[in-house]
Image (cartoon, rainbow, N blue to C red):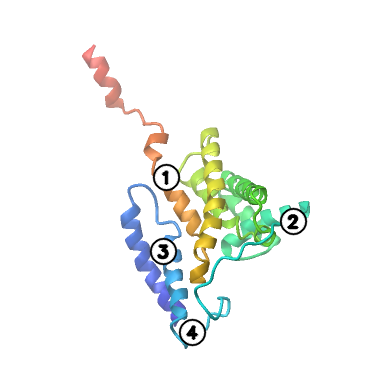
Amino acid sequence: MYVILGAAISVVVMLATTNVVKPWGGALTFPFVLTTWLLLLATYGFSGLAGTALPSGKVVAAFQPYQASPLQPIDLVSGVFQSISQVFLKGSGIAALLLLAGLAVNSLAAAGFALGGAILAVLTAHLFGAESDLITGGLLGFSPVLTAIALGTVFYQPSWRVVAYTALATVFTVIAQSALNVALTPFAIPALTAPFVLVTWLFLLPRQCLEAVPVVASDIEKPAAAA
């Protein structure tokens, strides 16, 4: 019943968010993130709901730093595929291949941006010294994969300029993912796809400045008439 209630509420949140962000983009996964955050936080106040995957005991806890460990090539490959499969909360290389195949059927560009985003996310996280288990488990790469697909093929037309712009956003999504992981530690809830939403919205705001202004027939006729 709790899950059904959350699903119903997320529809309302989706419609509300869509109305607010209509000028520069879509609601993305924000309704899912907001609704799920509230449902998860509320479980700490309801004795009848036990969050088996959530931390128990004190809700407020400090972030514990860790020592980064080197990744083997096989771990990097695993991280790439896990980053793709974790988009649908599934840690499986086979699932990642199926998802890439499904994307390719609809759009080869979308599949390419998904794979490229996963590779860039894993390399970025490894370069910055992120926790190895987070990288190999795809937990730092699923939001960057979504960012790469959204900016690279959904909201912008694929081009070399868009590739560079999307790559910058993908790298920043890795940083945003790690930042929110730390920031939400005291609340004992996951970041989910909030980094993807935040970065994609930020990179959509200057959309009018980046896209070429279409030439209208009347714009050509006016100078000609004046001459």
Dot 3, how many residues are within 10 Å of its Cα: few (below 14), some (14-19), or many (20+)?
many
Name the residue tied to disc 2: 75
Q: Is residue 71 left or right of residue 59?
A: right
**Alpha carbon of mark 1 to alpha carbon of mark 4: how far?**
38 Å
- The reply to whether discs 1 and 3 touch (Cβ–Cβ < 8 Å) is no
Residue 114: percent from the left, percent from the top?
59, 49
Nearest the camera: 136 or 112? 136
Residue 84 appears in the rendering: yes
The amino acid pointed to by label 1 is Leu
Nearest the camera: 202 or 14? 202
**Alpha carbon of mark 2 to alpha carbon of mark 4: how far?**
36 Å
The amino acid pointed to by label 4 is Leu
Name the residue tied to disc 1: 204
Say what secondary structure mark 2 lies in.
helix
Q: Quadrant of the C terminus?
A: top left
Say what secondary structure mark 1 lies in.
helix
Dot 4, how many residues are within 10 Å of its Cα: few (below 14), some (14-19), or many (20+)?
few
Name the residue tied to disc 3: 31
Say what secondary structure mark 4 lies in.
loop
Residue at left 35%, top 59%?
Answer: 17
- The reply to whether discs 1 and 4 touch (Cβ–Cβ < 8 Å) is no
